Image (spheres, rainbow, N blue to C red):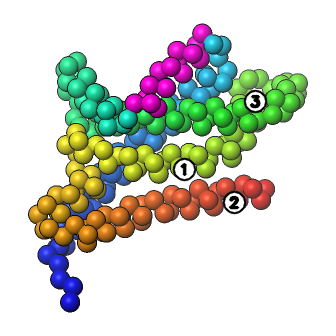
């Protein structure tokens, strides 16, 4: 007969870790998406003198492993005496990491809009802003959404690395329970189930939007 020392208090501890994971993910994805949209438009519209330095900077965040970025970001804020809490440092680093990938998603979405469509919009008297808002944004969003959903789910799983900064998110909470209770398989199974319950609605919602738009 199966027996476990896991209590309701331990499940509550895991739930708090899951909420921390959600908080870090939500802040990072929101900030990273806003920055990614701005940087993506700049990369698509600006000349090489603006685009090349930005591209080089974003390539750094895409090339260097996230764990190294977190450690260096935490060390830098300590050197500069910013006094950031681990949560703030984690969100800043993850936001820049997310922005680096989101920039390419946005740039690719904008580039997918046919040039003839954009020229037709401008010939009708639309301004650049109206062209971007009413023509480019809707079409680019349809193309970019699947990649953005994948990025969001990836950031949520990568957020487990913030445990190195001392945050007790879902994975760290499960490690603490494994050390105390010595039931690794059962606890990690619960941890994996929680990750699935968080990820599945996001993936299904993205699939729903993609299917709905494809039928329009």
Q: Is residue 14 above or below residue 30?
A: below
Label 3: which residue? 131
Q: Residues within 10 Å of mark 3 (few under 14, many from 20)?
A: some
Q: In the picture, residue 182 is in which quadrant?
A: bottom left
Outermost residue on the top side: it is 49
Label 2: which residue? 211
Give how far apart the Cα atoms at labels 1 and 2 are.
14 Å
Q: Quadrant of the C terminus?
A: bottom right
User: Sequence order check: which comes first, mark 1 or mark 2?
Assistant: 1
Residue at horizontal 38 percent and vertical 35 percent from the top: 65
Q: Is residue 155 left or right of residue 38?
A: left
Residue 159, position as x, y percentages in the image? 35, 46
Residue at horizontal 57 percent and vertical 59 percent from the top: 205
Q: Could you say whether the residue bearing mark 2 is in a helix, strand or loop?
A: helix
Q: Which mark is residue 149?
A: 1
Give how far apart the Cα atoms at labels 3 and 1 are.
25 Å
Residue 187, position as x, y percentages in the image? 25, 68
Outermost residue on the bottom side: it is 1
């Amino acid at each position: 007969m199966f027996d476990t020392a896991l209590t309701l208090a331990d499940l509550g501890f895991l739930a708090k870790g899951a909420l921390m994971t959600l908080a870090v993910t939500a802040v990072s994805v929101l900030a990273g998406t806003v920055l990614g949209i701005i940087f993506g438009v700049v990369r698509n519209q600006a000349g090489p003198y603006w685009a090349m330095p930005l591209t080089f900077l974003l390539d750094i965040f895409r090339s260097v492993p996230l764990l190294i970025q977190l450690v260096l970001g935490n060390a830098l804020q300590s050197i500069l005496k910013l006094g950031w809490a681990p949560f703030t440092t984690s969100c800043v680093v993850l936001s820049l990491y997310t922005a680096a990938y989101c920039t390419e998603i946005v740039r690719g979405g904008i580039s997918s809009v046919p040039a003839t469509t954009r020229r037709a919009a401008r010939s009708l008297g639309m301004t650049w802003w109206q062209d971007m808002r009413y023509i480019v944004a809707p079409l680019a969003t349809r193309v970019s959404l699947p990649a953005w959903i994948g990025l969001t789910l990836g950031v949520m799983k990568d957020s487990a690395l913030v445990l190195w900064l001392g945050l007790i998110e879902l994975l760290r909470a499960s490690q603490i329970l494994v050390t105390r209770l010595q039931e690794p398989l059962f606890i990690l199974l619960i941890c994996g189930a929680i990750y699935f319950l968080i990820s599945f609605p996001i993936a299904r919602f993205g699939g729903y939007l993609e299917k709905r738009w494809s039928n329009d």
